[in-house]
Each structure stands twice: as structure tokens, then as C-alpha cells.
Image: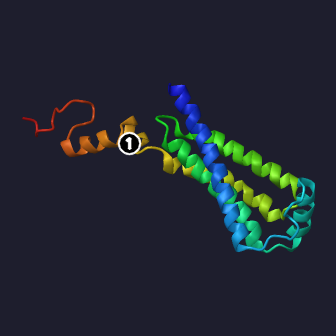
């Protein structure tokens, strides 16, 4: 059952990432004018229309594509690491890998500006940051491998954290 949950969480992160990418792109289409002739065009025609439009496209319209990749990776990784019991970064890794692969394929298929190629490097840190924020708070460790809660209780109780209370009552 644990393996099923692990697989489901990783796949859920990928699906959420794709959903966020789609929503941010729809927002970009609503905010910025898209090139004419896309309705009813075949995939080859759409690629030609967009390739001709990219050199004259506004910066913000193209930046929305990069924003969709980065935000999708962040939220997908957050989901994958939030709903797992252990190894949050390992569960976020499929989301990060799929998003890097999708971005790479997209960058190779259309003539994006060079800043878009360089900016796509932000996908990996966004995924790691999402996994960091998504991990459960019980994953944090204090000094010498103690959990944060046991390290805090050791300080307030006056114990040395080793299970011994010798000296905690003032030596009496």
C-alpha cells in the first residue's frame, strides 16, 4: 500500500504541475493578444504561426510561458512532497524531471529568445523550493540528529537529550 501511495503522490505532482501550467498559460492568453489564425489550424500551421509571431511578441507574453513552467514545477513539487510520509525530494523528482523535459522539448521546437533558454534553468530550483516548502514539519532535524521537538524539550527540561536527567535537578 505504501508503494501505491508513493506512486500516486508522484503522479499527482506531475498532474498538478501540468494543470498549473495550463492555467497560467490561459491567464497569459487572456492578458496578451495571441496571433491570429490559430483557430482551426493544424499542429504544423500553429507551429509556423507561433514561430513567425515570437520575434515580434511582447516580452510579457513570452515571460508568461516561463512563469507557467516555473510555477507549475513549484506547485507540483510542493504537492508531491506534502502528501508523502518520507523522502519528499524523491517524490518531487518526477515532477521536476517531467517539467524539465517538457520545457526542453518546447524550447527545441520553437525559436524562443535566448533569455528564455537561460531562464528555463529556474525550473529545477523552483521544484526544489516547492519540495522544501511542501515537506512535513516533522522532517526537520535539530543538532546531532534529534528531531526539532526533542531538541526543544531537552533545552526546556534541562536534560542532555540522551535520556538521562543527571544534573537536571541541580545535582541533588
Q: Which residue lies at the image location 52% right of the left edge and 48% below the top edge?
A: 132
Res 125 seen here: no
* Residue highlighted by disc 1: 142
Left/right of residue 152 with respect to residue 172 in the rendered view: right
Question: Where in the figure is residue 74, as x and y percent of width and height?
Answer: 60, 53
Q: Which residue lies at the image location 36% right of the left edge and 38% below the top edge?
A: 147
Q: Quadrant of residue 45?
A: bottom right
Name above or below for residue 5 compared with residue 30.
above
Front one among 58 and 86: 58
Left/right of residue 45 with respect to residue 21 in the rendered view: right
Name above or below for residue 30 compared with residue 133.
below
Q: Which quadrant does the C terminus fall into?
A: top left
Front one among 32 and 68: 32
Question: Where in the figure is residue 167, as x and y percent of width and height?
Answer: 15, 36
Left/right of residue 34 with respect to residue 153 in the rendered view: right
Q: Which residue lies at the image location 92% right of the left edge and 55% below the top edge?
A: 44
Q: Which residue lies at the image location 87% right of the left edge and 74% below the top edge?
A: 56
Res 111 seen here: yes
Which residue is most to the front?
40
Question: Where in the figure is residue 152, as x and y percent of width and height?
Answer: 28, 45
Identify the secondary structure beneath mark 1. loop
Question: Where in the figure is residue 5, as x and y percent of width and height?
Answer: 52, 31
Amino acid at each position: 500500500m505504501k508503494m501505491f501511495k508513493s506512486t500516486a503522490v508522484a503522479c499527482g505532482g506531475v498532474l498538478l504541475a501540468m494543470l498549473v501550467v495550463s492555467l497560467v498559460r490561459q491567464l497569459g492568453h487572456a492578458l496578451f493578444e495571441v496571433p491570429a489564425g490559430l483557430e482551426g489550424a493544424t499542429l504544423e500551421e500553429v507551429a509556423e504561426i507561433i514561430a513567425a509571431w515570437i520575434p515580434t511578441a511582447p516580452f510579457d507574453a513570452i515571460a508568461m510561458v516561463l512563469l507557467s513552467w516555473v510555477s507549475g514545477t513549484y506547485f507540483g513539487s510542493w504537492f508531491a512532497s506534502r502528501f508523502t510520509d518520507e523522502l519528499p525530494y524523491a517524490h518531487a523528482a518526477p515532477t521536476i524531471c517531467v517539467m524539465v523535459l517538457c520545457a526542453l522539448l518546447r524550447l527545441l521546437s520553437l525559436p524562443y529568445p535566448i533569455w528564455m533558454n537561460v531562464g528555463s534553468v529556474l525550473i529545477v530550483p523552483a521544484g526544489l523550493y516547492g519540495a522544501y516548502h511542501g515537506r512535513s514539519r516533522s522532517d526537520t532535524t535539530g543538532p546531532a540528529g534529534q528531531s526539532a521537538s526533542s531538541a526543544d524539550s531537552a533545552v526546556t527540561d534541562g536534560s542532555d537529550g540522551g535520556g538521562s536527567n543527571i544534573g537536571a535537578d541541580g545535582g541533588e
